[in-house]
Structure formats: C-alpha cells, structure tokens
Image (tube, rainbow, N blue to C red):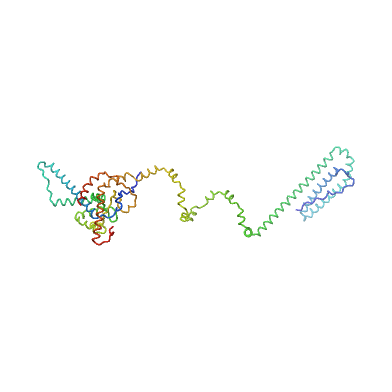
Amino acid sequence: MTARQTAFDTVPREARSFHGEPAGLVTRTLANVVDLVVVAALLAGGYLGVAGLLFLRRGASFTFPIVSYRLAYAVGVGAWIVYMAFGWRTNGRTYGDHLLGLRVRTMDNTEVGGVRAVARAVLCAVAPLLLVWVAISRQQRSVQDLIVGTHVVYDWGGSRRRTSSEDAARMRVDVAATVANEPDDRDAEPVSGVDGER
Amino acid sequence: MREPESIPIHDLPTEPGSQTADTGPSATERGIDFLAGIVSFGAGLVVSALDGEETDERSAGVAAFVAAGAGLFLEGLRAATPVLGSIERAAGPTIGSTGAAESVGELLDHWRSSWDDRHEDDRQRAADEQLRATFQRAVDTLLDQLDLTSLVLDHLDIQRVASAIDIQTLVADLDVDALAARLDMDRLLDRIDMNRLLDRIDMERLTERIDMQALLDRVDLPAVASGVIDDLDIPQVIREATTDTASEGVRDVRLRGVEADRAIGRAVDRLLGRSNGSRR
C-alpha cells in the first residue's frame, strides 16, 4: 500500500504563532555567524587535512603550509558560496538557518531554485553587510532578497514542503516534547555560546 | 314466415250420450283426436309452405286441394267417431277389462301434449329472441341520442360518490411496487426543493434519536484505525519530526532570536516614525 504524503505539520506549538512570518535582523545575523563558524571549521579541517597529507609525504622536513591571505580569502569566500548555495537549493536553509529556525523562500512561497540560490549566495558572500537592510525594510528583506526575489521566514518545521503560512490551517502534531534528547543537543552548545556573546 | 295455423279439431262436437258420465273420452275418440291433430298439422304445414309462394298459381291450387282434402278427411273422422264409439262401447267390457284401450289412450295423450309443448317452446324462444334484439336496438338508439359524460357530470354528485368509496380497501388492493416501477424518480426529485426540505428537518431531534453507541458498536474501529495509520505513513511523520526539530536549548535560542527580531523591528519603527504593525 503506497502511503500518500502526510498532511501533518511538524511545526512545534510555540512556533506556530509566527510560523511563516519574515525573519528579522537578529536571527538572520546569528544564522550567518553560525554559517561563518561552520565554514571556518570546514576550512580549518581542510587545512589540517592537507597538512596531514604533507606530513605523511615529507616526514621530518614537514612544516605547516603557508597560505597567503589572498588565497585564504578566495578559498573562504568560495567555500562559503558553495556551502550556502548548496543549503538553500537542497533544503531551503543552511545549518545556521536551521539552528535559528529560518528558511529561504521565493516571494511566491516556493522553494528556491538553483540559479536563485547561487546568485543569492554570491551576493551574500560578496556584500554581507547589505543584510542590515532587513531592519529598515518593511517586509524585512535584505538587499540580496530584493535582487533575487526571495525572503527569509521563520520555519521551525522539519520538511521543506511545509513552510508557508497557509499551512497553518492544517492538522498539526505536537512532536516537540518527544525529542528532548536528540543528537542536536551537541550542536546546540556553540549556538548557546553565540547567544551568550550577543 | 307466417306461423302455421292449426286447424281446430279439439272442439269437435261429441255425440250426446256417446260417453258415460264417469269416464273421460274413450280410447277411440282419443285416437281419432290424435289422428285429426296430425292431419291438421300436416295440412297446415303444407298450406303455409305453399302460401309462401303466393304468386305461383299452381301452388295455390295445390294448397287449396290439400286443405280441402284435409277438411274432407276430418269430416269423415267426425262422422266415424260415433260409430267407432258405439263399437267400442259394445266391446267395452272385453277391451276395457284388458286395459289395453286405456293405456293406448294415455300414450296418445302423452304424444300430443309433448308435441304441443315442443311447439310452444319454439314459439317462446323465437319471441324471446325478437324481444331481446328489439330491446338492444332501442337501448342503442337511446344511448346514441344521449351525451352520457355530460349527463353524469351534470347530475352526479362526484364528491358524495367519492366519500362513499373506502380508500383503505382500494389501497390495500393496490400493487405499490408496480406503481413505483412506473414512476420516473429522477424527474420527481428534480421537482423537490431539497434546501427547503432540509430546512424543515429538525437536526437536533434527528441526532437525538440516533443511538451513537449502537452505531459505533457496528463499526470495526480497529480496522478503520489501522487503515488510517496505513494511509498516513506515521513513520514518515516521526522521521520528519525527529530529524529536523531542535532540542530545548536550540528552541530557546530560536525564541530569543524571534523576540530580538521583534524588538529591533519596533525600535527601527519608532526611529523612522512608522506606525506599529506596519511590518508583516
């Protein structure tokens, strides 16, 4: 028997009042910070990996590779672009967005396509400060959002196909209470730190 | 065709004293009577048959001859009667003692009366037939002249007649199934205003009368429930809910982030002089 798509909404109860509303400057900035940390960690891991390979090859003559600032910047920006574009295209959210309960949608409330995701990632990487426009915009959209026709909404739900506010009328299942001890707890720690720093 | 007229022979004068006071006509007289009857009847038949073709000169002659012959024969009989009577009286004791004369007389009487009866029956039947035909024609003519429908409508009190009819008995004889089979239910339903009909139904009372428990007892709830569960793909729901929802700590961060967003938004609104709630 083929089950049809479930009509349940996995948005937790406390998030339902603002589910689908455009997100503000604070959450989006925090999400970007998380993403930066993640990308930095990835780059550091990559650097250590390369260093490990070099150590295996050179042995006693091993020294840590010197990376020029320009190369580090270029690789960092490139990694960030790929990371964000991949996240938005596949799930509508990066890891930072996921932690802060955000999702990127088009203005028609559809999923973000590949071109849009890449363009938005490039704009965000090249000019991240344009995010400040969110605070001024009535629709809480950054300059990047205005250019590529997207917006960022609160979405604590699990699945990418249930993110619009019109889903509010659907039957909901409160599953939040049952998942107190899940692997996400580990990931929550650095975010708490970020929250504390703020 | 004219009825053949019998020539009267019954009132032939009898010789006074030709019979004793205490006995009826003698056997001889009765035999002569019978013979005369046959002759007169036969002569009547012949004459009437020949009368049918009156134009024929010859048949008229024959008829006259037959009639004359018959009359002559009858006269002869009349003349012979007293003679035969006296002979009978003379031999009376011998013949009478045997009883033969008596029984012959009775037999002849019986023949004659049966002959008469049959003749009478035929005449009666013909008359009945004619009467019936005449009556039929008269009634037909009468009905042709009358407009029965208007007559009934003008003079009949239909209401009274209808009130006298026992509808129950009538309905009991009715085959309602056959009647329903002839009805076009679709057309009938098209003519019914369902909304008005439903307005007139008291749903509260209707639902009160439904025994929900009995209804539920008849439902195979486990089967229904398992069908629903199969349809919903519960494992998929759980998978989505557990993989993407966050822990308490993350939810706390998210909620604080939302509050901070709103605070920033309100501050900016105040700063720019925008009315509250302008943001979505």
- Taking depth in this image into account, of B221 and A63 the one nearest to the observer is B221
Looking at the picture, how far across and down is residue B19, in whole percent?
Answer: 88, 44
- Taking depth in this image into account, of B249 and B159 the one nearest to the observer is B249
Residue A196: in sight, yes or no?
Answer: yes
* Residue B87 vertical position relative to residue A121 in the rendered view, above or below: above
Looking at the picture, how far across and down is residue B65, in whole percent?
Answer: 82, 51
Q: Residue at x 24, y 45 (%)?
A: A185
Q: Quadrant of the N terminus of chain A?
A: top left
In-image side of B279 versus B197 (left or right):
left
Single out the residue that lies furthest toward the left.
A61
Single out the residue that lies furthest toward the bottom.
B273
In-image side of A57 versus B245 (left or right):
left
Residue B240: in sight, yes or no?
Answer: no
Q: Residue at x 13, y 42 (%)?
A: A55
Looking at the picture, how far across and down is residue A110, in whole percent?
Answer: 29, 53
Q: Residue at x 52, y 52 (%)?
A: B183
Looking at the picture, how far across and down is residue B256, in whole percent?
Answer: 25, 52
Q: How many marks?
A: 0
